[in-house]
Amino acid sequence: MHVLMIGLNHQSAPVEIREKLSFHPDELADAMVSLSNERSILEAIIVSTCNRMEVYAVVDRLNTGRFYVKNFLAKWFHMTLDVFTPYLTIMEMEEAVRHLFRTTCGLNSMVIGETQILGQIRTSFLIAQKYKTSGTVFNELFKQVVTFAKKVHSDTKIGENAVSVSYAAVELAKQVYGSLSQCHLAIFGAGKMGELALQNLSGKGIGSITVINRTFQKAQEMAERFHGRAQPIEALESVMEKIDILISSTGATHFVITPEMVENAQKKRGNTDLFMIDIAVPRDIDPQVGDILGVHLYDIDDLKEVVDSNLNERKREAEKIEDMIDVEIEKFFTWIGMIGLIPIISALKNKARDVQTETMKSIERKMPDLTAREKKILNKHTQSIVNQLLRDPILTVKELAGKDDREASLNFFIQVFNLHERVENEKKILKKYHRPDTHPGEEIQAYMKEQFRNNEMI
């Protein structure tokens, strides 16, 4: 049983490849079910976003698992392997698990520490659970990962500092005004940068929005998307008389907002605070505007300084999180090691119980006059003897599982207690439960709870 990750992302593949290997949200469930029906695949979860497509699988053998995952991708996207395999990243076991932890925490994102990926991975996990493509291993792993990522975002400062220009603009505005709910915002320029800034600000509960653009139709379209008002470029100066924040991002090649325009507006405003952010290159706002009373002017270099400083802060937080991930990985693989002991411990306990059952039958044959109460007492005490005798061997097998020569030590244990045939039978049962197409993930969880129920098996 092995954990495998095969995928591509914004670092390993260009957008023209990523867009060809992207799962639509509506087809994600069908894709997971289809993948889980491939040979060698025991569990499957697919994560697909604009920046990454990753297949996580529990496989019986790594070489066949790699083959059937790639084969599935080729069939699903109607592509030949040679088109996309050069861009694939393949990770196994600890490397794959570490990658999942880092990705869910936002450490592998274009914007370090972003939280959107956490929601996307959680959604994929919930789909996998609903359609039974996630079983024992991934139910444990993904619950642990999602819980850990939530804790990271609440207990560390990984997401506190703005690391995009548009978001930095939002944070600066909040420093000046505190709550933005009563602020009137104007966006000058209906291009991509202006829209991104508007998305961030509207998410912070901005009071009212005005969009100004040289092409009035574009201003109307953007204003409609964000429930604002559109104004023609001729109204720019009169708009400045009424607003609190102006973000400028036109494609002009010269200054379009002059000191004279702003001075006139400020006189009518009584020189109250006017927050102006110039994210255009070349700049839209004459830098002399920053000398006017009441005006707070920031250009893209000012914002970049904020972004760089904040990015360094996030990187320092990321280093702390890496150490925390080490602890989580150790927990997970300790748990995985316990799964490997299930067939051995179960075989040993079943053999001991068989001996106890046969002993009770022999006693009853030789002492046919025993009362029901006497049989119950004998059965209880012989079971107690068996449990006490099993305690030390079970503790020993747990210790052997942590040794460097784990496999050899466990095989010797099996040989000493003559458990080989029973262990193989238990492995077959475990594998049968583990297959999502024959027994749902919940049933194998029930099987494991039954095996681990007694203290000596924990």
Image: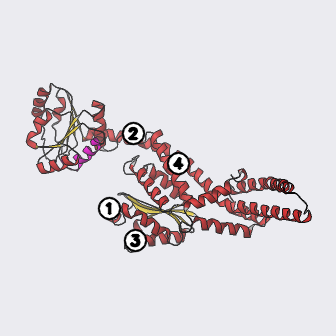
The residue beneath circle 4 is 325
Q: Label 2 is placed on what type of residue?
A: Glu
- What x and y, as percent, mark residue 315? 43, 44
Q: Residues within 10 Å of mark 3 (few under 14, many from 20)?
A: some
Per the model, the C-alpha gap separating discs 3 and 1 is: 19 Å
- What x and y, as percent, mark residue 386? 81, 56
Q: Are the residues at dot 3 and dot 4 in contact (C-beta closer than 8 Å)?
A: no
Labels 3, 4: front one: 3
Is residue 41 visible from the viewing direction of this image? yes
The residue beneath circle 3 is 76
Q: Label 3 is placed on what type of residue?
A: Trp
Say whether disc 1 or disc 2 marks the residue closer to the N-terminus: 1
Residue 200: say if magenta. Answer: yes
- In magenta, the rendered stretch is 190-203
**Residue 101 placement, left or right of 284:** right
Judge by depth and name the residue closer to the eye, 279 or 345.
345
**Residue 302 placement, left or right of 392:** left
Look at the image and tell me in which quarter the N terminus lies. bottom right
**Helix, strand or loop under label 2:** loop
Question: Magenta part mainly helix, strand or loop?
Answer: helix
